[in-house]
Amino acid sequence: MNALPAAGASLPDPLWYKDAVIYQLHVKTFADSNGDGIGDFKGLTAKLDYLHDLGVTCLWLLPMYPSPFRDDGYDIADYCTIHPSYGTLDDFRAFLDGAHARGLRVVTELVLNHTSDQHAWFKQARSSRDNPRRDWYVWSESDDRYAGVRIIFLDTERSNWAWDPESKSYYWHRFFSHQPDLNYDNPAVRDEMWNVMKFWLELGVDGFRVDAVPYLIEREHTSCENLPETHEVIRFLRAKLNEHFTGRMLLAEANQPPELVRPYFGEGDEFHMAFHFPLMTRMFMALRLEDRKPLVEIVERTPEIPETCQWGIFLRNHDELTLEMVTDIEREYMYEEYARDPTSRINLGIRRRLAPLLDGDRRRIELMNGILMSMPGSPIIYYGDEIGMGDNIYLGDRNGVRTPMQWSGGWNAGFSSADPERLAQPLISNALYGYQAINVESQKRADHSLLNWMRRLIAVRTSSRVFSRGSTTFLKPANHRVLAYLRTLGAEQVLIVCNLSSSAQAVELDLGRLAGALPIEMFGKSLFPRIGELPYILTLGPYDFFWFKLRRL
Amino acid sequence: MAQDSLLSDELLRHLMAVGQVDILVGVPTLDNASTIGGVVRAVHQAFATYFPRDRAVLVNSDGGSRDGTPGLVKDYSLDEAGTVTVSHSLRTMHRISAPYHGLPGKGSALRQILTAADLVQARAVAVLDADVASVTPERVAALIRPVKDHQFDYVAPVYARHPLDGPLVTQLVRPLIRGAYGWQVREPLAAEFGCSGRFLSHCLEQDIWESDVAKYGIDLWVTGAALSAGFRCCEAPLGPRVTTAAHARLGFQDVFQQVVGAAFLVLEQHAPYWLPRQQSEPLALVGTPTSEAGEPPTVDASRLTQTFCSDLQNLQSVLEPILSANTLSRLNAIAEGDCGQLRYPDDLWVRTVWEFLAAFHRGVMRRDHITQALIPLYLGRTGSFLIQYAQAAPADVEAALEAVGLEFERSKPSLVECWNQASPR
Amino acid sequence: MAQMIADAVSQAGANFVESVALFLPRVVTTISIIAVGWLIAILLRTVVRFVLRWVRFNAAAERLGVASILKSAELPPADSVVAAIVFWLVWIGFLLSGIDVLGFTGLQGLLSGFAGFVPRLLVAIAILVIGFVAANFAWRATLLAAVNARIPSPRLLSGAARWLILILAGAMALEQIAVARTIVLTAFAIAFGALMLAVAIAFGLGGRGIAKRILEHQFPEQERSGADEISHL
């Protein structure tokens, strides 16, 4: 068991996010304390010890604000309070204090781009054209402005404009039609969003994951994505943040190729972190192709980012595995390999969890996690993936990957004491991934369960900063099924070797420049032969990987 | 690159084959062909009898023996041990012999042993002295058990010997360590000890392995490091200590200089720890002490005291910068008396040692001159003590030595004053 | 006629004034060089003293035995002495170059001679210092070695070692500054030779036993001193 660290609300290191291991969870489906079938903050607070013991250092919560729930909470009806089903603001404060006491930081959602159409602001804006809040949203008489801009939720929306019968005009929405976009050309909007941020930061929240960043500003004859004016808005908010708070973090959700994400870091004056979406896709591709090429390419293509910035890397999240930003050939390949069943496809992506995507294969799950934890960036674990939870593609939208956390094999998987029919989302109950087969309680008891393996993996990952801050150099052995790279930070060096293939492999690595170093395998601390001038031969079982710490004596 | 590394490729290959161990026994050697066979046998018997389930390895670190010692270690046949236990042990018993590189001396041998122990993640380590002809399996186990079963980090040996034996330890080093560090260690200079993986990692991180301390005083430094860094220390009785004749390679002068010079250096290094400490505590004793006390030494003590009396006069001008006027005049006074019945009182001796230590620290002259100047005084003290207690019972001698230790503790404040006063080097 | 005299006088007067006028700037320059030099010398002295204090020069001097000599000669402590030497050298240098500006030819010859002498003086001082330190070290080392090796009359031996080195150093220093060269050389040769002869006779005739013992100590088979009869460890 990890000893609890000293309590402290804002812990001193301002670059904490560079070395963080983040756990993404949804309050709604994590733990229910009052038996209404919906997870809440009291329940979540009771599970903080589990999270601390897992070894993660930061929690990212999906939206917890009042909402009509037509987009699982991303359609926000009130920014500055907690949805009553999840508890009160006091419950949230108690949770925050409990997390900080265990050395865990908390990052919440900030949906800048749009609100729910049930939000008070929109209700006022649509009530009449003279309303002071009218200008807070983007209105138009016709729906042919900003023509040619792509539609994101292709499966449900036909246009980016929606007709408002009340004010008899169109309003702009890049997402669902019930999520009107806010108008960031209006300084009042910017100021108010800063107030929203300030509210949560003063409570003690350590940062925000900013949803849908590229779409803030619209301009005619552009794609309305990644515009310079959008960056200005970001810089404004960041400057305000720097002025009033220290040690807080802004994480950008910008699903773009890495060169186009780079501007969101600015010169260290915009976002602290941004997701690296393409890395995730390429990892799955490389695994299926049994070829390291896509992975090596994307990492080598990733531009340098400012010293104070960090990538957020992940295998899965609450959304579909996005195939928006890949070529058609790649998308076809991914669909064929990972999503034969068309039901699992949605919105140019695949709505599956990690374990089902990898056929529940323990070795592949370990390999993907091993690669994730040794890649440059701060890794993010999606709740449930640490025990290998399954999904339900027959639930609507992306809810299939948002089923209740499986704590035990008992009543409602230990998630809630309510009637099973009442649960916010139905449980996974099949024999393969169901809660009787996959749950925290049984995995805690088995020394070699996935859960315990993940704990050890995270412990080794957090034992050294070479993983989060080191440089990355790929070795390119002749055997393309083997992915090998060197992470270096100062005098510390770690060599990672992975077998992407389902059959055992032998590989000859040219390690001449490391001659004299002694590889020590990081999990068992066994000694391997000292590196010499000749090619270093390694053999790996199917989907096997090694992390070697290189020591010089 | 294998050349300038601490561990050769060959040794690494052996360590890889051995893998992770629970117990490692290290034996530094230099021309120990006569005794090494007994040591290896004792170690293997200890493994088989007392630690049958544990993964264990013996590592011999050799300084370039020319009498075939490494060969004897490697070729030692387990069958000839004569005990059924050994050849029917549960596990494979590993034995490695490798030469060490670096500065000649025990420091490099020990460093190699500790580095090897670190790499194989040994939880309990025992370092033995190959010069000793009295190694038994029980002694090996006595050094390991406190670490393995009782979670101690450092185990110092306790030998059963006559209290009049080994005056350099009993009159000088032991009470000095007691007075300074505040711990009663009976054998601070012992070449044998046990330690934990935690402690040896700490030792390896320290920056002394290329210095003079490593050459001559590594055993004392290890003791001091364990005491000053707050590790859990204890003592284990090992019975009598029988050294071979070949062991006495150096003349007394050189031995004294090395030992005392090293002791003073180690004390200087650990000063921040022991300067504020007061009084002393005994270390925990793990195991049952044997009652045999050994033979008292037969020596003509009056020759020692004669040396003292004559040399004191000659060394006046050298002693003046080192000792205080008061101490020097008292010494002169007792030297003028009857040398055959010399009485070198405890408090005067303690003052002498403390003042020498302070002078060493201040660097009033070359350090090896300082230690050389102490020799006649030490001889005088030893002679005086022997004259007084040669016919006494061992218990009375122990009481007298205890009094010396207490005197060191009592007069420590004046040392601390001396130490802090003058500008250090 | 009177006019001629008057003219000559006034011409002489004008010449005089002219030469004074030419000379005055030089005087001013000289005075300013000397003054500046004095300031710089003072500054350097302070700096040198500070640096020596920082590197604990006094402690080193005490260790080498120099300090005690200075004390008995009633000189200030070592770092002040060095600082004073630095001060004087620097100021004299400035003084000389200042005077040089005045352009008195006779003086210039004297000055260059002096300037040539200074480095040799420094070398001589250095030899003396080194010699002194070495003598001290040899004295103490010999004394301790002799005492602990049970060689009789250790004080005599160590004293002899010290004086030998001192005499040697003294002679070398005197030769450097070329004072009474021949006399010094001869006197030294005689003294040194006599001393060595005496030591040789003493050792050769009376010291066979001692020599034997020293050799035995170098190649020990059995130690005879009481110290080795017991096992000290």
Image (spheres, grey):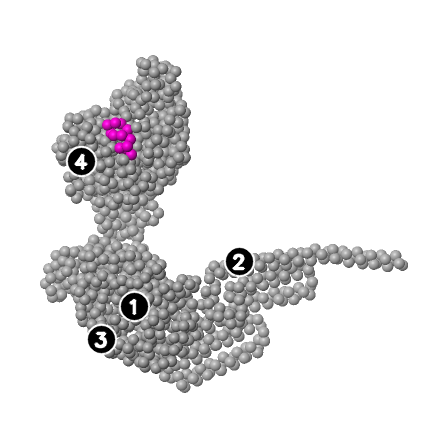
Q: Give the residue number, with chain letter if any, for mark 1.
A: B405
Could you say where residue A97 lies in the image, as x and y percent from the top left? 29, 37
Looking at the picture, which amino acid does disc 2 mark? Val
Reply above or below: C135 against A250: below
Question: Does residue A253 appear anywhere in the picture?
Answer: no
Q: Which chain carries label 1?
A: B
Magenta span of residues: A82-93
Distance between the alpha carbons at the discs numbered 4 and 3: 73 Å
Q: What's the CA distance linking mark 4 and mark 2? A: 76 Å
- Residue C185 is drawn in which quadrant? bottom right
In the image, residue A90 lies in the stretch drawn in magenta: yes
**Distance in Å between CA atoms under marks 3 and 1:** 19 Å
- Name the spot of residue B312 as percent of width and height, x first: 38, 77
How many labels sit on residues? Answer: 4
| Marks 4 and 3 close (CB-CB < 8 Å) | no
Task: Give the secondary structure at mark 1.
Answer: helix
Tell me the quarter of the picture where residue A218 sits. Answer: top left
Q: What separation in Å lies between label 1 and label 2 (alpha carbons)?
A: 49 Å
Q: Do the residues labelled 3 and 2 touch (CB within 8 Å)?
A: no
Q: Which mark is residue C47?
A: 2
> Which label sits on residue A407?
4
- Position of the N terminus of chain C, as image quadrant, is bottom right
Taking depth in this image into account, of A97 and C196 the one nearest to the observer is A97
**Residue on which disc 3 sits:** B393
Q: Which amino acid does label 4 sit on?
A: Trp
